[in-house]
Amino acid sequence: MAAQFGRRLRKGAVTTTVAAVAVAALSASQAPDVTAGAPGTGTTSDSTAPRGPADGDSATGNSPYYTALPPLNSPNPAPATGTADPRRPSEAGIPATVLDAYKKAEATLRRDKPGCNLPWQLLAAIGKVESGHANGGRLDAEGTTLTRIIGPQLDGNGFALIKDTDGGRYDGNSEYDNAVGPMQFIPSTWAWAGRDGNGDGVKDPNNIHDATLAAGHYLCRNGWDLSRQADLRRAVLSYNNSEDYFRTVMSWLEYYRENTHEIPDGTGPLPGARSDSDRRTTRPGPATGTGGSTGRTPGSGPGATPGPSAPAPGKPAEPARPTEPTPPGTGSPRPEPSDPPAETPTPTPTDTVHRLENAGTPRLTATAGDAFAPRIGARAVTQDGDAVAGVRVRFTVTGDTDAAFAGGESVATVRTDAAGLAHAPALRAGEKTGVFTVRATVVGRLTPVLSYRATVTERTADTLVRTAGTPLTCAPGEQFADRVRVKATREGEAAGKVAVTATLVTSGEDPAENDKGPHFKDADGHAVRTLTGLRTDADGLLTLPELYADDTTGTFVLRLTTAGGATLDVRLDVAEPEAEPSPGPSTGTDRT
């Protein structure tokens, strides 16, 4: 079953004057960082304040949101249950599983992106205005919403025009995209921003753990530091590019910073008024917004003929038009004038894109830690092969890799130039070797995916040398006094982070592992004669673990090898210590 939001706000519409005044009051009393006119705060009234994403991209497709504001007084820590008045202090209560997801996401981002400084209260504020904390915490045991939360279809009819990008997988709509889940991601954003927050191997926008962690990563991209007001503003506006949305989120952020408490799942107040409350339409479904709907209303799906509009909340229904009397001699009443047909949206450049073409990018190969060259390029073209400018192309790194674009991001969105070309930021290999894929897609249009295959190879060295020339000797059953220290170089320069394998071989001519003589020891003290996973430091230096001798005497060989062909044989001698000479007979004369 899917809960659909009914009445929606047309693009450019604003909230009511009462709501605006309430927001201003809240900002003044509870959100000092966003008080209008305060110097140095990046206020919404400041024309120089940073705006949302320049390319118009957003997590939600700028879908509607809940406009209820927090109480003007501080949160009441007393537990609250049921569907309390949304303007009372019970709003401080957050369902247990939802609150846990917010806090776990903050902890994960503190570890993975410590420079972001993401507070869990920001996730709570966004979760509040997007879905009322997953419809008051109505979740199953795994944290998945009991009924799917789906926003309006983004068909250009009062909203952005985003044609289907997921084949209806997440939103059940194969013609247009809808925002889905407790954090209201549109499918095209979820495709790259989705995360597995509960470790079940699935990225599900309807799961509070997955959606919350994805929202945290989304807010922490672009190197933003959310402890800075300018970056916080950019991040929130990138989620939903609306000034009213920003002010509403900031009000809840400050409210939750004051105090909050845990309440049982399913007992939170259901979400109330939405920013689309003045839009009168039956598409795409009943305006419950509570997860209780079974889907679209009859005649409201893509391609269906819209039925009569339902009145907006608080507004009286329009009176029916009076019909004129049937003229004499006719068998039916005169047809009533029909409403003018809806205007067909003007095609955008994105609508004309037929495919993406590889813009001369060769097979990508780089050594671990190095940059790939050249940069990945794609060209957007029409069916006739004409270039399309001004189209957003999203490049996404996929696969088991830690390679990333500049800034450590796995996703980059670039707008095509006049020649239809979009070049991804510089891509740098990580430490994981192997093959991965970079995929290019058109944002807001379902076209074939353009894939680039990339390979990360091991760091290499062409020379290994010992850093000391002292002989390595040991008595049987003892420990070698000196440890083996080497330096790896490549073309005369230090070769850092190069993998090295150390093996006690039978001889210089026989590379088989020796089963006697010198050896290393594992954690349990057992003899080990081959070590892998060794790696030089940034200066190309490596010190091996201690070496021990068994009771076998003789000359032995320790062989060190690296990727790239560097090899070094180190001689080890195990011998009985030479006996000290005994003193000779006395030759002196005894004098008496």
Image: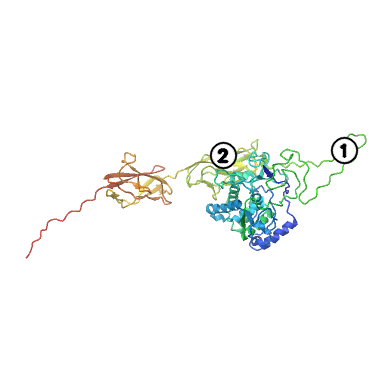
Q: Is residue 415 visible?
A: no
Instruction: Residue 172: give x, y in percent of width and height.
Output: 66, 40
* Closer-to-camera residue (462/459): 459
**Circle 2 crowding by C-alpha within 10 Å: few under 14, some 14–19, many from 20:** some
Q: Are marks 2 and 1 in contact (CB under 8 Å)?
A: no
Dot 1 falls on a residue whose secondary structure is: loop
Pick the residue in front: 278 or 189.
278
Name the residue rendered at 61%, 51% in the picture.
98
Q: In this rendering, does residue 591 appear at all? A: yes
Point out the image quarter for the N terminus: top right
The quarter of the picture where residue 391 lies is top right
Q: Is residue 165 above or below residue 117?
A: above
Give the residue number, with chain letter if any, for mark 2: 451
Mark 1 or mark 2, which is nearer the start of the sequence?
A: 1
585 lies left or right of 62: left
Q: Cα distance, mark 2 to mark 1? A: 60 Å
**Front position in the image: 477 or 471:** 477
Task: Kindly identify the amino acid type of the residue bearing the numbered disc 2.
Answer: Ser
- Nearer to us of marks 2 and 1 is 1
Residue nearest the observer in this picture, 571 or 133: 133
Name the residue beneath numbered marker 1. Answer: 334
- Horizontally, residue 7 falls left or right of residue 405, namely right
Snapshot quadrant of residue 558: top left
- Please, what secondary structure does the residue beneath circle 2 have? strand
Rendered view: 89 above or below 7:
below
